[in-house]
Image (cartoon, rainbow, N blue to C red):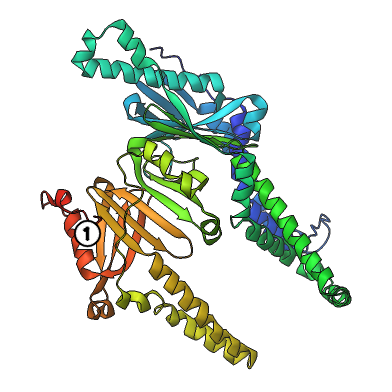
């Protein structure tokens, strides 16, 4: 293995600088708005230097980001030595990181606009110890050939380590060794333009677009002639209900088109490939991203159905992984953004054959129904009181909030349930969206039993399972179950009691 040292592409200095500028957008906008969208450049005017201080601070910080980006590019080198990927950077404080190839779980790729222009790629190295949301090493901008070389060196080192640690492989024929080096891959799912349209339509993207429009307009409130607009709207309403409805439709149509465009840009060419016990997820139009998920690092699977998608029979499949995502801090990775529920079990069974995907759930008892909406009255009472006090008599209408609160609680009660079968725990719950949480017993980091004083009187309790994912972990809660059911789950999880998992099967 050569000890030749490699450097990043010079454009990495610009990329690091632009990343730093993103942090300055909000402070700059605050300064720009508070100055009335007017920067005084007359040095002779009184108070000029006092007014310009915040701007000078932002400019100095921007130059520091630029200097930092240049220094990191200038000092950053990586090389291969002793079956390790080695990284060194820093001017005054030298930092070195040696990453054994056998610890590398995956190489995640990202191609931003600057990468696409120069034919480069950003590489994030994920290892078994990458549990804090950050990659073990990040190569900001290298050529695609260099990225392929890192992957080949990783595979070669792992294969050589396998040969050294397994004596039986020394007697294998050359044909068998060549066969083992071949990679087998298959496309699990590829999203079509129709899928993207449905994904955008059934997501909260339209609401986000409308909220963003309102937020932007609120920043220019002092420049908006509200009286004139009110007069125009009043005259507009006189044209009739049909014209007003048409105008509202046009606004929502515009928001829908923007939502579809955003979804199309983010999820363009979304493809899932299974290759050698790992999943490779790639997506993006302007910024291409590719993440590798080792199957043995998947901690839990979530099937998420928001009310609109549940109505039309669609779901989103999310994995909680101990490996990294697209350079994000959270470990929740969207495996399949949109899939018909009737076609969901096939791909899931192929990828995770150890799970049962159609379990029979044990439901909360009838006496637990009020507990699903009783707690909501605690925060509902002051809201009703304040609305009644400040907006009397129309504020009394806030009492009607009790109706949707009770209906939501009943919906949550009908959704909740759990199932245990052999080494699998399934928890189904709802806040707004219906979530099915599937996990193996060996992946559960903690299983907690919770019971309040009022639950104890009704002989009900709740359980919450937590798996390793990100800094805080990921959890799922089965609320207000029969206390005997909760004790059964706790006994199932108790590793000191042998043979319980073989004897417990609640779905017969």
Extreme residue in the bottom direction: 393
- Number of dots carrying numbers: 1
Given residues 162 and 485, the one toward you in this image is 485
Task: Point out residue 483 in the picture as x, y percentages from the top left corner.
Answer: 22, 70
Residue 59 vertical position relative to residue 105 in the rendered view, above or below? below
Is residue 473 shown to the viewer in this render?
no
Q: Quadrant of residue 156?
A: top left
**Quadrant of the snapshot with the N terminus:** top left
Residue 116 vertical position relative to residue 495 in the rendered view, above or below? above
Given residues 273 and 46, the one toward you in this image is 273
- What residue is at 41 percent from the left and 44 percent from the top? 345
Task: Point out residue 403 in the picture as x, y percentages from the top left corner.
Answer: 51, 81
Q: Quadrant of residue 289?
A: top right
Q: As drawn, is 433 to the left or to the right of 167?
A: right
Q: Would you name the residue on which mark 1 appears? A: 489
Q: As drawn, is 10 to the left or to the right of 462?
A: right
Extreme residue in the front direction: 508
- What residue is at 76 percent from the left and 63 percent from the top? 249
Is residue 424 shown to the viewer in this render?
yes
Task: Point out residue 500 in the picture as x, y percentages from the top left corner.
Answer: 14, 52
């Amino acid at each position: 293995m050569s000890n030749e040292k490699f450097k990043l592409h010079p454009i990495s200095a610009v990329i690091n600088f632009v990343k730093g500028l993103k942090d300055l957008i909000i402070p700059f906008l605050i300064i720009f708005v508070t100055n009335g969208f007017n920067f005084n450049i007359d040095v002779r005017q009184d108070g000029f230097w006092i007014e310009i201080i915040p701007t000078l601070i932002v400019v100095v910080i921007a130059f520091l980001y630029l200097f930092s980006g240049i220094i990191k590019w200038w000092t950053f080198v990586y090389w291969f030595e002793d079956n390790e990927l080695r990284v060194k950077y820093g001017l005054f404080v030298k930092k070195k990181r040696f990453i054994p190839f056998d610890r590398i779980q995956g190489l995640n790729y990202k191609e931003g606009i600057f990468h696409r222009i120069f034919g480069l790629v950003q590489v994030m190295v994920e290892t078994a110890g990458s549990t804090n949301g950050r990659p073990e090493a990040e190569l900001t901008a290298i050529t695609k050939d260099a990225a392929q070389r890192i992957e080949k060196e990783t595979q070669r080192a792992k294969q050589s380590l396998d040969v050294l640690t397994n004596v039986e492989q020394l007697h294998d024929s050359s044909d068998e060794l060549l066969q083992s080096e071949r990679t087998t891959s298959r496309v699990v799912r590829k999203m079509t333009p129709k899928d993207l349209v449905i994904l955008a339509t059934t997501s909260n993207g339209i609401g986000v677009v409308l909220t963003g429009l309102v937020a932007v307009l609120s920043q220019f409130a002092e420049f908006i002639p509200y009286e004139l607009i009110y007069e125009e709207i009043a005259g507009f309403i006189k044209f009739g209900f049909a014209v007003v409805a048409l105008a509202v439709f046009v606004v929502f149509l515009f928001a829908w088109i923007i939502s579809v465009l955003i979804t199309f840009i983010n999820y363009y060419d979304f493809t899932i490939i299974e290759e050698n016990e790992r999943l490779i997820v790639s997506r993006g139009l302007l910024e291409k991203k590719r993440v590798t998920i080792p199957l043995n690092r998947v901690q839990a699977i979530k099937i998420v159905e928001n009310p609109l998608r549940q109505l039309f029979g669609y779901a989103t499949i999310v994995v909680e992984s101990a490996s990294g995502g697209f350079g994000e801090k959270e470990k929740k990775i969207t495996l399949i953004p949109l899939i018909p529920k009737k076609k969901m079990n096939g791909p899931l069974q192929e990828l995770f054959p150890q799970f049962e995907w159609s379990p029979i759930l044990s439901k909360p008892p009838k006496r637990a129904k009020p507990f699903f909406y009783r707690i909501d009255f605690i925060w509902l009472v002051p809201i009703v009181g304040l609305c009644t006090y400040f907006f009397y008599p129309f504020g009394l209408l806030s009492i009607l909030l009790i109706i949707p609160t009770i209906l939501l609680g009943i919906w949550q009660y009908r959704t909740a349930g759990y199932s245990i079968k052999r080494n699998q725990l399934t928890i189904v719950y709802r806040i707004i969206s219906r979530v099915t949480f599937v996990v193996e017993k060996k992946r559960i980091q903690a299983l907690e039993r919770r019971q309040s004083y009022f639950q104890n009187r009704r002989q009900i309790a709740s359980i919450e399972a937590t798996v390793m994912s990100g800094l805080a972990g990921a959890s799922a809660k089965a609320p207000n179950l029969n206390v005997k059911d909760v004790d059964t789950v706790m006994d199932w999880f108790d590793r000191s009691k042998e043979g319980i998992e073989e004897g417990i099967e609640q779905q017969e």
